[in-house]
């Protein structure tokens, strides 16, 4: 009799413990619980203490935090027929737990596949220069397209960032030659602009010296002063005709007086 009572008491304790462990759930602040009661969805539970009916209810936890997902490298053929490998990073979160569980089997896997196909299709519509230079515009277009496709699943895509663009070796050489040619072009343009500005200044200086001959004499004396500061053993410099003109005029007058 005592043994039967003890067994019944232990069985009752086991049932109570099983009920408590199965019925009581604690959900964190960023978690929600989608509860299926006899296969039908009831209002979302959480956060905090949640009590469900064992056997009748099944609770599926869903995190509402932003998920960071790497999109694997994809072979993209651009509009100008250049094959590149591109990978990206995707940021998304669940905004409707019921849709994320009931409308798609695995929202994480589905979002990953949509991201890969969208990456190939969107980046393949532009040229290589657009892929390298218009990164922000492509990121915005990717975010818009992927978010539109995941919205029925209760998933919100907040950002998409293209990470790396791997170019073939022959294309890297072509881009290097193009960059070198562009640098040479800029150097020639800058050199031409410098020569043009220098010619303008020389023309102005020549006009000033033509109107006032004394400026030429001053420039000649300045040149002599600059040469004298150097350690030169021999100095050759021209003598302006204007300096010898007084002597030349005296000689002519003497010859005319004879």
Image (cartoon, rainbow, N blue to C red):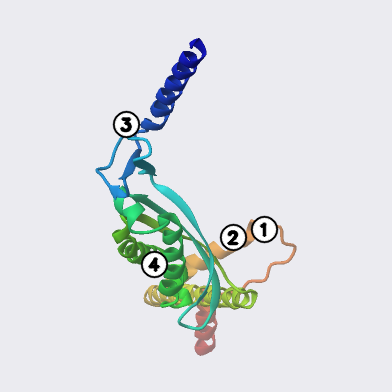
Sort mark 1 into few (<14), some (14-19) or many (20+) by Cα contacts within 10 Å: few
Q: How many marks?
A: 4
Q: Residue at x 59, y 60 (%)?
A: 226
Which residue is disc 1 drawn over? 230
**Could you say whether the residue bearing mark 4 is in a helix, strand or loop?**
helix
Q: CA distance from mark 3 to mark 4?
A: 47 Å
Q: Residue at x 38, y 73 (%)?
A: 208
> Which class describes the residues within 10 Å of circle 4: few (<14), some (14-19), or many (20+)?
many
Q: Nearer the viewer, mark 3 or mark 1?
A: 3
Residue sticking out furthest to the right: 233
Q: Residue furthest top?
A: 2
Q: Identify which residue is drawn at 48% across, 75% down.
A: 128
Whole-percent x and y of residue 206? 43, 76
Closer to the chain start, of discs 2 and 3, is 3
Q: Earlier in the sequence, mark 4 or mark 2?
A: 4
To which residue does mark 4 refer?
138
Vertical side of 133 occupied by 255: above or below = below
Q: Is residue 143 above or below residue 206?
A: above
Q: Which residue is mark 2?
A: 226
Q: Secondary structure at mark 3?
A: strand
x%, y% of residue 15?
42, 25
**Between disc 3 and disc 4, whose residue precedes?**
3
Is label 2 in a helix, a strand or a loop?
helix
Check whether the beta carbons of the residues at disc 2 and disc 1 lie within 8 A of each other.
yes
Q: Is residue 56 left or right of residue 75?
A: left
Q: Residues within 10 Å of mark 3 (few under 14, many from 20)?
A: some
Q: Earlier in the sequence, mark 1 or mark 4?
A: 4
Q: CA distance from mark 2 to mark 1?
A: 7 Å
Tag of residue 51: 3
Report if residue 95 is visible in the image.
no
Query: How busy is the neighbourhood of tag 2: few (under 14 within 10 Å), some, or many (20 plus)?
Result: few
């Amino acid at each position: 009799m005592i043994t039967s009572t003890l067994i019944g008491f232990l069985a009752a304790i086991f049932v109570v413990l099983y009920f408590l462990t199965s019925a009581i759930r604690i959900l964190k602040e960023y978690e929600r619980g989608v509860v299926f009661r006899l296969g039908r969805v009831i209002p979302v539970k959480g956060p905090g203490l949640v009590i469900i009916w064992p056997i009748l209810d099944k609770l599926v936890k869903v995190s509402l935090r932003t998920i960071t997902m790497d999109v694997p490298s994809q072979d993209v053929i651009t509009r100008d027929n250049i094959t590149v490998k591109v990978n990206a990073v995707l940021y998304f979160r669940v905004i409707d737990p019921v849709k994320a569980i009931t409308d798609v089997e695995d929202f994480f896997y589905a979002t990953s596949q949509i991201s890969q196909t969208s990456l190939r299709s969107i980046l393949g519509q532009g040229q290589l220069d657009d892929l390298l230079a218009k990164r922000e515009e492509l990121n915005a277009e990717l975010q818009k397209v992927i978010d539109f496709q995941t919205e029925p699943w209760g998933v919100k895509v907040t950002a998409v960032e293209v990470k790396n663009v791997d170019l073939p070796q022959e294309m890297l050489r072509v881009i290097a030659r193009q960059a070198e040619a562009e640098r040479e072009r800029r150097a020639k343009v800058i050199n031409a602009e410098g020569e043009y500005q220098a010619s303008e200044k020389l023309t102005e200086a020549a006009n000033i010296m033509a109107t006032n001959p004394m400026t030429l004499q001053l420039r000649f004396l300045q040149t002599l002063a600059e040469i004298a500061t150097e350690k030169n053993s021999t100095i050759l410099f021209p003598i302006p005709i204007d300096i010898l003109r007084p002597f030349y005029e005296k000689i002519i007058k003497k010859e005319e007086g004879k």
